[in-house]
Amino acid sequence: MAKSWATLGVDLHLDPTGTGTGTGTGTGTGTGTGTGVRRGLTDALRDAVRTGRLAPGTRLPSSRSLATDLGIARNTVADAYADLVAEGWLTARQGSGTRVAERAVVPPTDTTPPRRLRSRPTYDLVPGTPDLAAFPRTEWLKAARRALTAAPYQALGYGDPRGRVELRTALAAYLSRARGVGADPEHILISAGISNGLRLIGTALRARGSRAIAVESYGLTAHWQILAEAGLRTRPLPFDQLGTNPAQLTDEPAVLLTPAHQFPMGVPLHHDRRSAVVDWARRTGGLVLEDDYDGEFRYDRQPIGALQGLDPNHVVYLGTASKSLAPGLRLAWMVLPPSLMEEIAKAKGGIDTCGVLDQLTLAEFITSGAYDRHVRAARLRYRRRRDTLVEALAQHAPDVHATGIAAGFHAVLSLPPGTEQSVVQAAAWQGLALHTLSFYRHEHAVAAPLDALVVGYGTPPDHAWAGAVEALCRVLP
Ligand SMILES: Cc1ncc(COP(=O)(O)O)c(C=O)c1O
């Protein structure tokens, strides 16, 4: 007869009969009275106090209300309380009820020192995360307030598996304007990150009978892992200075690409190859999965429009708030060929799995213009950081060359051959978190591994940026 007891604001799972999953050890009969139940309740309460589940000073419910909650006799509760007062676990004072005694919690007997937490690096230059200190909290809160005020109460129910229509509508307009995506709100689906979107697509492809998918020679292992978990082998395509080469695409059902800014190499896909990959998709009925993870961040070149604009029937466009706002939001979007929507919604489980309040807030954030303002400010900040990085390298590490820096917020730093490992070790000593390029190389990639680092310049907050660049320059050859 285990019960959750929520009287007087205290939530506690108790089993006075000792027969459930609670902490009581008594052997009560569960009939509501008798010594067995009294012992069970006493044991359960003592255990809760000893382990700290009931904190010192906590006021316990009156014997009447606990008896009602647990379905036992009031006297049984009063007797259990009296036993515990006598033992010193509880105190009873006129006017202030029964409370957990101040010194009741027994310190743990285990004297093993706690395991040392892995110390955090002083500077984090691992690519992937934007400057979280610059999250637009005030504007976001304002948008949240407006969005919730305007939302119909029905918005708070189980939603459309595609996501809230307000967000899909806002995204359709934004993506068409800013990224050249041919988007209809009907064909947009909100997911918990691009990673979750890939999981849904992988599941749908596997359900169609597919077993493999083409990917790039360099990319995110986590994404390949997600596809593998969905049952798809990943086969890397060759990579050169024009980007990923689609010439070897054959009968794969799909290819995953980062056309606007290859991750992590940083080059845009050459226009001949953009056409070639779309031709391949049309010819074979294959799908191009376009990961446009940092499409908002372009510096010294004309923004490269989304590939999806060339053929919305064969390209799945994947965008995310993880770079432009924060990955913790877990909000991303897919623009799907109409023929795929039903399968993906099914793979999502037929319900909306992304929180509605954040979706409504993002919709309001976009339509009010706050998103554009935030992106413009972030672009400026990252561009300045990139410039200081390039200047510092020229001055302090002239043998190191930064590439892939016209967009996004990471750079590939090519190192003199044979120096990668010593740089990584020196970085660890300096408290500098960095990734090597080999970390992003597919295990079956044919190109020879290169000595290089992938340096993210988004993550450190502004005040730490100069220190991070200095520390980086100290470890470079
Ligand atoms: C290449 C690439 N795609 C997508 C993402 C974003 O993934 P998500 O939306 O799951 O946070 C990242 C983030 O690091 C990335 O590097």
Image (cartoon, rainbow, N blue to C red):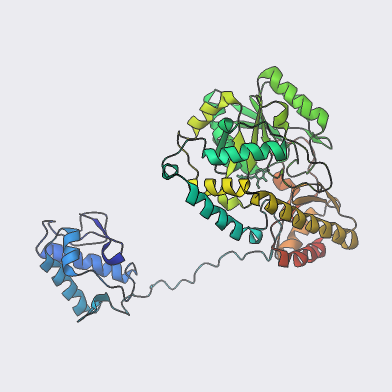
Residue closest to the eye, 137 or 79: 137
Q: How many marks?
A: 0
Q: Quadrant of the C terminus?
A: bottom right
**Residue with the most extreme left position:** 34
Residue ID at (63%, 58%): 135
Percent x, y of residue 360? 53, 46
When asked about the image quadrant of residue 339, the answer is top right
The answer to whether any part of residue 255 appears in the image is yes
Q: Is residue 16 left or right of residue 259?
A: left
Residue ID at (71%, 40%): 178
Residue ID at (20%, 78%): 85
Residue ID at (26%, 75%): 99
Percent x, y of residue 126? 69, 55
Percent x, y of residue 82? 16, 75
Q: Is residue 342 left or right of residue 81?
A: right
Answer with the quadrant where ligand 1 appears in the image: top right
Q: Where 310 sits versus 412, above or below?
A: above
Percent x, y of residue 327? 60, 51
Q: Is residue 408 left or right of residue 206?
A: right
Residue closest to the eye, 2 or 68: 68
